[in-house]
């Protein structure tokens, strides 16, 4: 509906431009061409009149009986200019006319003729004091001798001739305008092909997306702005569709991971309250309840951490610190469990001190999650190496275990939230499937990289980078 309205407005505007332009060319062009002809013709006629008035023969004959000898010469000039040429005496009487034989003893008087009223104007348009029936473009030049005005040379050019010349030029202008206007009608085709049709498809796509059909594809493949907009909307719909699927999966996983421990806790608590579990066995089941509560607490804490990272609510406290010292402190947290399982933590650190620029608290979280995973999936009586190296101005931190490894088909999925390798679900009941997701978010927030190298049944190595500082 809106697209149709836009097309109608565009067409109406185009028609308006055509009509307005045609009348502008007709009226404005007519006025300007007429004024141009008036100016150029009056200048030429005045120059000719002045030259005639300056002629010695005209000066000497204006008051003599032989003035008619000028008739033939002046008629030739007047015919060349397609005009009427007069000689007017000082009394305002016509004594010579190229279009009429006048006896010098019987001149034609001009009523109210007063050359002084012309002022600085050298030409006028009108009937020249009522003499002509049609408008004329008239110029006069004084004939002077011995510092006195003896008469005037007047040249008259019929305005009908000027109007005919104007109409000829105006017709050419109108034809050119119409040709150009017709040529610009190609804009309608350009608009329809490159704007209206793609815009219609884009609006259809936007309507489909608004209706929830995020799988709809906008088929606009041009390389211009419309194509870019269509590709952007297609990409947006894909991302929204992925986010929608992720949210549904996220809710399902959260519901599942919360429901299992809550069901256990509720069942055991009710069994204790109604006496199903005897007093002497309650201690055992209370430990299970505590275990499941700890699992819920860890899951909740992980979700809050991810929320802070996602919403960027957690400010980055970037500062300089010793990564080797941070690794030692984090490894010390796991000494107890490693001792019980006879797992050796081998620290292969580059130098006594190695300073990096990052958020120390978040990097501690990364190290904790990676070590926690390495210990969970390591075999007893094995070793875990934590190594730091410096390459190309960056610090590389490696956490390598010799445990179960990760199947090749799962390597690209381990960063997904709530993802657990099927073989590990029974072994890692306390795991939330969020640890590596948190690691990935933190490293990305630092604009750094993390990679994984793993062989099933041999072990896994995680390597991430940090910015080195002096």
Image: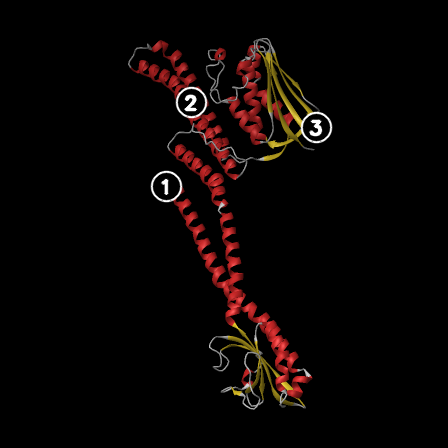
Neighbourhood count class around disc 2 (C-alpha, 10 Å): few under 14, some 14–19, many 20 upward: some
Q: CA distance from mark 3 to mark 2?
A: 40 Å
Residue at the disc numbered 2: 249
Give percent across and percent down for residue 272. Answer: 32, 14
68 and 326: which one is in front? 68
Picture disc at residue 1: 1
Picture disc at residue 392: 3
Q: Residue at x 48, y 60 (%)?
A: 24
Label 2: element kind:
helix
Label 1: element kind:
loop
Q: Is residue 413 above or below residue 240?
A: above
The quadrant in which the C terminus is found is: top right
Determine which quarter of the picture holds residue 59: bottom right
Q: Residue at x 54, y 22 (%)?
A: 369
Give percent across and percent down for residue 371. Answer: 57, 19
The quadrant in which the N terminus is found is: top left
């Amino acid at each position: 509906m809106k697209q149709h309205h836009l097309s109608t407005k565009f067409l109406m505007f185009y028609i308006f431009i055509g009509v307005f332009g045609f009348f502008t060319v007709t009226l404005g062009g007519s006025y300007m061409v007429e004024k141009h002809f008036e100016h150029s013709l009056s200048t030429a006629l005045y120059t000719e009149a002045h030259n005639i008035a300056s002629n010695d023969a005209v000066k000497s004959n204006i008051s003599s009986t032989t003035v008619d000898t000028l008739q033939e010469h002046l008629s030739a000039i007047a015919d060349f200019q397609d005009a009427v040429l007069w000689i007017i005496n000082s009394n305002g009487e016509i004594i010579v006319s190229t279009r009429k034989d006048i006896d010098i003893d019987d001149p034609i008087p001009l009523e109210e003729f007063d050359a002084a009223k012309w002022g600085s104007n050298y030409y006028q348009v009108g009937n020249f004091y009522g003499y002509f029936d049609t408008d004329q473009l008239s110029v006069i030049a004084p004939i002077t001798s011995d510092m006195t005005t003896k008469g005037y040379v007047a040249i008259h050019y019929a305005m009908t001739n000027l109007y005919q010349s104007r109409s000829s030029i105006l017709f050419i202008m109108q034809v050119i305008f119409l040709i150009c206007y017709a040529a610009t009608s190609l804009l309608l085709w350009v608009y329809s092909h490159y704007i209206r049709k793609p815009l219609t498809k884009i609006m259809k796509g936007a309507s489909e997306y608004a209706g929830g059909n995020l799988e709809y594809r906008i088929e606009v493949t041009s390389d211009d702005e419309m194509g870019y907009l269509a590709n952007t909307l297609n990409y947006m719909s894909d991302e929204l569709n992925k986010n929608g699927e992720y949210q549904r999966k996220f809710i399902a996983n959260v519901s599942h991971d919360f429901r299992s421990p809550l069901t256990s806790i509720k069942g055991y608590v009710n069994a204790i309250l109604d006496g199903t579990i005897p007093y002497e066995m309650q201690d055992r089941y209370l430990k299970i309840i505590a275990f499941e509560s700890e699992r819920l607490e860890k899951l909740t804490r992980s979700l809050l951490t991810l929320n802070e990272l996602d919403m960027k609510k957690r400010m980055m406290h970037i500062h300089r610190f010793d990564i080797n010292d941070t690794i030692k402190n984090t490894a010390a947290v796991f000494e107890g469990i490693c001792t019980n399982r006879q797992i050796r933590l081998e620290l292969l650190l580059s130098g006594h001190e190695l300073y990096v620029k990052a958020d120390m608290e978040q990097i501690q979280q990364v190290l904790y999650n990676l070590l926690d995973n390495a210990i969970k999936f390591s075999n007893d009586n094995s070793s875990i190496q934590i190594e730091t190296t410096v390459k190309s101005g960056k610090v590389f931190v490696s956490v390598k275990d010799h445990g179960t490894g990760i199947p090749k088909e799962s390597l690209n999925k381990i960063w997904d939230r709530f993802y657990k390798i099927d073989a590990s679900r029974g072994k890692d009941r306390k795991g939330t499937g969020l640890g590596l997701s948190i690691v990935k978010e933190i490293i990305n927030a630092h604009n750094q990289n993390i990679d994984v190298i793993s062989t099933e049944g041999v072990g896994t190595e995680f390597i991430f980078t940090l910015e080195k500082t002096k």
